[in-house]
Image (tube, coloured by chain):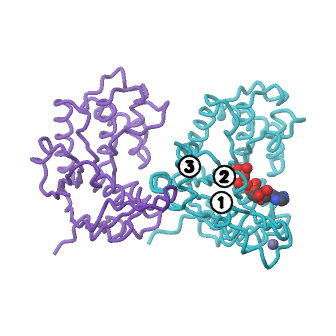
Amino acid sequence: MTVPLLHVKNLHKSFVLHLIDGRTIDPIQDVSFTVDSNQHFLLWGRSGIGKTSILKCIYRSYLASSGEIWFSSDQFGSVDMIQADDSMVLKLRHREIGYCSQFLKVLPRVAALDVITEPLVRQGMPQAQAHDIGREWLTQLGIAQRLWHASPVTFSGGEQQRINLGRAFIASPRLLLLDEPTASLDAGSKQIVVEMIQRAQQRGTAVLTVSHDLDTLAKLADGQLAL
Amino acid sequence: MTAPTWILHASGLNKQYGPGCPRCQQFTGPAHNNSQCPVCNTVYACVDAGFTLHQGEVLGIVGESGSGKSTLLQMVNLATAADSGHIWYREPRTPDADPVDLLQMDAYRSRHFRNDRLGIVYQRPELGLNMRFTVGGNVAEKLLLANWRHVGNIRTRIRELMEQTELPPERIDDDPHTFSGGMLQRVQIAKALSSSPSLLLLDEVTSGLDLSVQARVLDLIRRIQWEQQMTMLLVSHDLGVIKQLARRTIVMKNGHIVESGLTDQILEDPQHPYTQLLVSSAL
Ligand SMILES: Nc1ncnc2c1ncn2[C@@H]1O[C@H](COP(=O)(O)OP(=O)(O)OP(=O)(O)O)[C@@H](O)[C@H]1O
Ligand SMILES: [Mg+2]
Ligand SMILES: [Zn+2]
């Protein structure tokens, strides 16, 4: 039996709101699923059901309350993302697990070309080489050349989202977490996303997508869970 | 197994001002929202603090005024003597050598370590610079203490540092009083970097600057971090600054570390009531 790339087991997450009389919110209750390498797994369900929270627990932006999240790392073997120490999580984020949030969050004053190639440079690729690759990606993403040296802060919603996705895909992580990748995109841009997911799978990346855009994404998924 | 990559490993650091009394425990700490014992007036500036700092990493230290951030930083700077604890240091240039406890070094070695291996930048330029020296003289002071001797080499090095920190090198002999606040922070940074330290300590370095100046100083720090893979301890009460630079963050309150974690986790899923307050106030 092969070990899945990701195994989420009985995941629970509650938030204790100390500023509001210690009130508790429990968005995730007993969620389990597995994602295999090269799989495109789709998590869907209505707004507010806790889809983003699941991705954030896996990426460790949120601390899960209980359960297990086993990631099968190339370098470190099986790692429980809930128990792993912060440095281990940083190492996995650096090389193996990518996350693309619903909205682009970038530092102002950094050019689109540098934003999109940052993961490559961080991994040690010389900047000139990273920029060559970056220019190819920006072309494929349909970002006009006049924008390459501008900061994405001023880009349109759709352009920002394409930069956001490009930055997540460019590093070819083993597991890519995508939060609503097609929201705020027109039909043409949605097609670009579909192609990016397919190509990533061919390169050996497993994609875990959270979305309610079933029209675009359901036919791409080879595994899914409704919440 | 990969070799350990930490450069600093601190544990059990304490600093109190005052004699202490049997009632202190009952009245001080984050749960009592107080650092000072009302019975004996002892201030607990830093209590049982510890952290690990990895080579090339920026660790943020955030907390309200008086929470003990600067005290912790000054203990690492070997300027404030810790009452107890250890600060293990592993020299990155000789990774196979045994780590040393900085707090066990004799005065001579401690002073040399500070001048040669550490650099510090303060919020107030007067703390980091001698305002009666020229700009170049300030940088030269640290180089001389780090045993640089050749005057020509020193001046070359200072010009190089001024260029690196985006200061006009022709102003090397100018009076620091003729420099703006943002420029003085650059002089402090040039001075701190002069001895090629293995650890840079930053205490509220952009607080009090105009927003646009603040942004450019932060850009400079980010560039230095990126180009030199500089290890940094970054103290700030501003979560925005911490977020831009630090991947991991420690939260302090009333002398105690109340929470530590990945910076995005601290911001998106803060656990401690105080951190929740801090995050909600920042937005
Ligand atoms: N030399 C000292 N003598 C007495 N009390 C001190 C001394 N130095 C610091 N303290 C006290 O220790 C506590 C922590 O001070 P510290 O300067 O470390 O706080 P901080 O978190 O850096 O604050 P700020 O954000 O205002 O810079 C405060 O209550 C302070 O008054
Ligand atoms: Mg301070
Ligand atoms: Zn007391």
Q: Residues within 10 Å of mark 1 (few under 14, many from 20)?
A: many
Q: Which residue is mark 2?
A: B64
Could you tell me which chain the residue with mark 1 belongs to?
A: B
Please give the name of the residue rendered at 59% of the width and 61% of the height, measured from the top-left corner. B53
Please give the name of the residue rendered at 44% of the width and 72% of the height, measured from the top-left corner. B1
Please give the name of the residue rendered at 40% of the width and 30% of the height, measured from the top-left corner. A152
Q: Secondary structure at mark 1?
A: strand
Q: Which chain is cyan?
A: B
Tell which residue pokes out farthest to the bottom in this image. Answer: B22
Above or below for B210 versus B102:
above
Disc 2 residue lies near ligand 1 with CB under 8 A: yes
Q: Which residue is mark 3?
A: B229
Q: Which chain is purple?
A: A
Name the quadrant containing residue B36. Answer: bottom right
Please give the name of the residue rendered at 53% of the width and 56% of the height, measured from the top-left corner. B248
Q: Are marks 3 and 2 on the same chain?
A: yes
Q: Secondary structure at mark 3?
A: loop
Tell which residue pokes out farthest to the right in this image. Answer: B132
The kind of residue tagged 2 is Glu
Could you tell me which chain the residue with mark 2 belongs to?
A: B
Tell which residue pokes out farthest to the front in this image. Answer: A21
Horizontally, is A108 left or right of A4 in the view?
A: right
Tag 2 and tag 1, C-beta contact below 8 Å: yes
Horizontally, is B190 left or right of B110 in the view?
A: left
Q: Which residue is mark 1?
A: B253
Q: Are marks 3 and 1 on the same chain?
A: yes
Residue B188 lies, in percent from the top left, at: 74, 40
